[in-house]
Image (spheres, coloured by chain):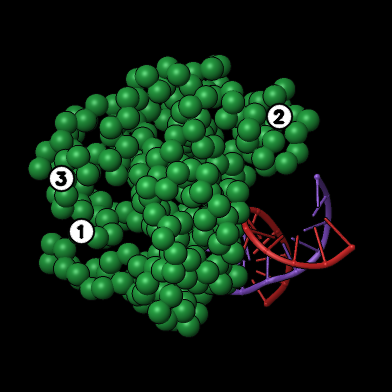
Chain colours: A green, B red, C purple
Amino acid sequence: MQININNFSLDATLSAGQTFSWFKLEGRWIRLVGNPITAKQTDRNTLEADGAGEKEIKRLLGLNDDIQRINKEISKDDFISEAIRKSAGLRVVEDGLWPSTLGFILSIQSNINLIKKRVQTLSKIYGEEVEVNGKKLYTFPRANSISARPDLTAEARLGFRSKFVIAAAKHFSETNINEEIEDEELVKHLLSIHGVGPKVLDCVMLYGLHRLSYFPMDVWIERALKEKYSNMVGGLKSYRAINEKMREYFGEFAGYAQLYIYDSFRKKTS
DNA sequence: CTTCAGGGACCGG
DNA sequence: CCGGTCCCTGAA
């Protein structure tokens, strides 16, 4: 199936540290949550994809967002405007509640390569073997599988994250947490998980559920804010206070501002 | 070989 | 609110 795209970069979007359920194999991106989905950008206006309907694939990749309007909406100053230019083609993905929660728990005090490696390891332990284009791969680990055999997480060398992963898997297996729940209750659900704090929460709300007003703040964002927005957040200390300020500043699409700032700032220094 | 930082969260004070 | 601590990996 071919999908028309505009001002979109699949590589940039899936390499921006928003999602850890996609991986690239021989030039094709693959996602093994539910039915296998593969995608490849063949030119600047064409996405070749299969494994799901066009609507579903667009949803996963944030392609239903009105990016023109969003970019305009968040262009509050020169710094963010330049970040938008430098990181053009990005979309906020919609990775799903569980894939996102697991991914960002694994991300705690870790770099992107390490996170991906952990997902692969967990997939080998807990996932099911599937064949895609003649290659044997493993599906993304399900919460039920992990909570059924929590002892096996030891093999994945997750360090102190191991108990967090188990707690999350248990919560997902034993409660009715799902993607239809309103923000307020969902936040309570997530924060009740031992290992989900404010930052992971914001990542899940934004990248997992596509709730675009959330503004996760990691070390990169904090550096950027300190450098570029010290006049706004200079006196503020707590995560919550700074976060509220920035969300207020950027508005309903603050999450996009976060993604652009993160991506452009990370590129600059690395 | 050692040191150190990496998309934080928890706990105690 | 603040500071120490947590586990493991890969880079230096």
Q: Position of residue A185 (x, y in %)?
A: 51, 49
Q: Say yes or no: labels 2 and 3 on the same chain.
A: yes
Q: Residue at x 44, y 25 (%)?
A: A84
**Circle 3 residues within 10 Å: few <14, some 14–19, many ≥20:** few
Q: Residue A53 has which mark?
A: 3
Question: Is residue A249 visible in the rendered structure shown here?
Answer: yes
Q: CA distance from mark 2 to mark 3?
A: 43 Å
Give the Cα separation between the discs numbered 3 and 1.
12 Å
What type is the residue that disc 1 sits on?
Pro
For residue A257, the mark is none
Q: Which residue is mark 1?
A: A36
Do tags 3 and 1 sit on the same chain? yes
Q: Is the residue marked by circle 2 packed among few (<14), some (14-19), or many (20+) residues within 10 Å?
A: some
In the visual, does A262 lie left or right of A62? right
Tag 3 secondary structure: loop
Q: Earlier in the sequence, mark 2 or mark 3?
A: 3
| Residue pictured at 21% horizontal, 47% vertical | A39
- Callout in the foreground (3, 1): 3
Q: Position of residue A48 (x, y in %)?
A: 15, 42
To which chain does the residue with label 3 belong?
A
> B9 or A268: which is nearer to us?
B9
User: A3 and A267: which one is in front?
Assistant: A3
